[in-house]
Image (cartoon, rainbow, N blue to C red):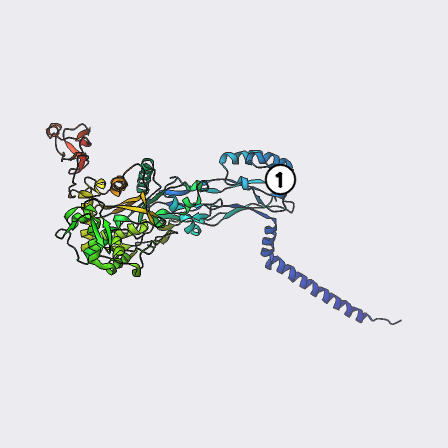
Amino acid sequence: MKRVSTVTVRKRLSYILIAGLFIFFIIDVRLGYVQFGMGKMLTERARDSWSRNIPFEPERGNILDRNGIPIAANQSAPTVFVIPRQIEQAAEAAERLAPVLNMSKEKLYKQMIKNSSIERIAEGRKISFEKAREVQALNLKGVYIAEDSKRHYPFGIYLSQVLGFTGIDNQGLAGLELIYDKELSGNRGSVQFFSDAKGRRMPDMSDDYDPPIDGNDLLLTIDTKIQSIMERELDNAEAKYNPDGAIAIAMDPKTGEILAMSSRPSFNPADFREVPQEVYNRNLPIWSTFEPGSTFKIITLAAALEEGLVDLEHDHFFDPGYSRVGGATLRCWKKGGHGSQSFLEVVENSCNPGFVELGNRLGKDKLFKYIREFGFGQKTGIDLVGEGTGILFRMEQVGPVEAATTAFGQGVSVTPIQQVAAVAAAINGGILYQPYIAKELIDPLTGEVSMRKTPVAKKRVISEKTSKEIRHALESVVAQGTGGNAFIDSYRVGGKTGTAQKAKDGRYMENNHIVSFIGFAPADDPQIVIFVGIDNPKGTIQFGGTVAAPIVKSMMQDALRAMEVKPRKNQIEKERTWLDPIMVEVPDLTGMTRNEIQQQMIDLRLEVSGEGTTVVQQIPEPGVKLEAGSVIRILMK
């Protein structure tokens, strides 16, 4: 038997020891790396495997009017979640919870036993606080209530087609809610808690809260005061005329900012599912197209004045009641015609043959050049979806008859927003502005503005001199002509009536018109332009001056007061009829005593405040015209 020496044994033991130490060193290095190098990552993975998230939805950004008044906001609406692995006695829990959520216990039971980390109950979404308290009172393990919200439209139907609406997940589905959905939505947050493999909460680990980031607020150019006035008047028009539809737009002619916009039929954005799709999918002020009628004569007038082809005061025209063009007879609305008149009277009387003459002087090339310069036949570029372009004749189709009818607004098709933008250019000094309705995106926490729109002047279409002549002519239309029902004492209002037959299957319909009026004020310094179109009003004579002009008057006078526009004293005197009320000019009562006021013999009533002997203030101001019998408020010193 071979004997191993002690030295050899010692060597072998040394090798084993060294190898063992090396192995332990490797293990120690690995453990250190796992502990210190990978510790954070492995801890996060473990926390992820233990964690359960209950989502918290962000607040969708508010949509505000130009003064910061919310017109689309949020209401708190709790949502019910269940953690299936935490549910004890699922059948009993389902039986107790199902009646509170108005759902079948079988359906709820299936969700409670699912092999998932968390289940959101559809019937428990965006419930009332009363329902949420009922759910909490059940004290069921594994049933949670998370904060959520739903969209709220405090003004109901106001601006509905413009605002659009949101879905169950607060996602934008139409209108501005869709266009600015990304900016309004924000980012979701959550509450994170920890549970073991059986879904039981781990008592020694605190919950983590990741707050949601709210969406930006969207500030509009809309003025809710003017919008409320517009909605009120359209409601009145619906009740009075039972029309097939109605459209209204108010715009600042110097910037292109939309101050109000509405149409009928309308809907409440919170209840959009209750109306036909065509009601909420069609924003009529920018989508609908129709023959404009006489409101289009403003463009022909602007072109003729800019080209120096007419002198409104000194050039005259004889209207026999018709005009013969290319073998066709084009008739004036007044049977027998207006006879001899100046071209200013042609405008005041909305005389079709007179505008045929202006069209002839221009020629078709210049006429259509100006029509396109004013923006017709193309989109205005307003920041809303679904805008129409209208329809113009192709130049090769334009003969003498087509050119003549276009001159007085027949045979062409335009959108309401095109008309408003074009008339604004005609009366604001000659600049065509791009209409817009969204003004700013604002961080609700910091107030930082991430997007700001400013007026876009697209081009100059006519000179300031021509624009001034147009303002004067259109003020005369209201004071002396067909627009008399839009006249407002103490305010200088200009405008033009429109009455257009509707066509169906290539033929004009009998007794079915779109009647319209487009007005602006003050005529010397326009600050607002308003268009109203009423589709087939019932029970009345279908003329723009009869139906639409009084509606614009009501909107205009209240809007001017809301805008704090001061009355004008140098307006053109109205040509009055026996139907017009007697107007009295308010005298200056400042400094007078009661006895001196009584000696004035004014046909106005006084409402006196104060105990003094002399007048220190009066409302309205001197020079304003009121209906006889109206009230003047005076403050005595």
419 left or right of 181 in image: left
Q: Residue at x 21, y 57 (%)?
A: 360
Foreground pick, 13 / 599: 599
Tally of marks: 1
Q: Position of residue 615 (x, y in %)?
A: 15, 32
Furthest residue toward front = 327
Within the image, what quadrant is residue 551 found in? top left
Q: Residues within 10 Å of mark 1 (few under 14, many from 20)?
A: many
Q: Amino acid at mark 1?
A: Tyr
Q: Position of residue 328 (x, y in %)?
A: 25, 53
Q: Disc 1 marks which residue?
A: 109
38 left or right of 157 in image: right
Q: Position of residue 525 (x, y in %)?
A: 21, 48
Image quadrant occupied by the N terminus: bottom right
Image quadrant occupied by the C terminus: top left
Q: Measured along the vertical axis of the image, is residue 189 above or below residue 18?
A: above
Foreground pick, 321 / 113: 321
Within the image, what quadrant is residue 616 found in? top left
The answer to whether one can see residue 43 in this image is yes
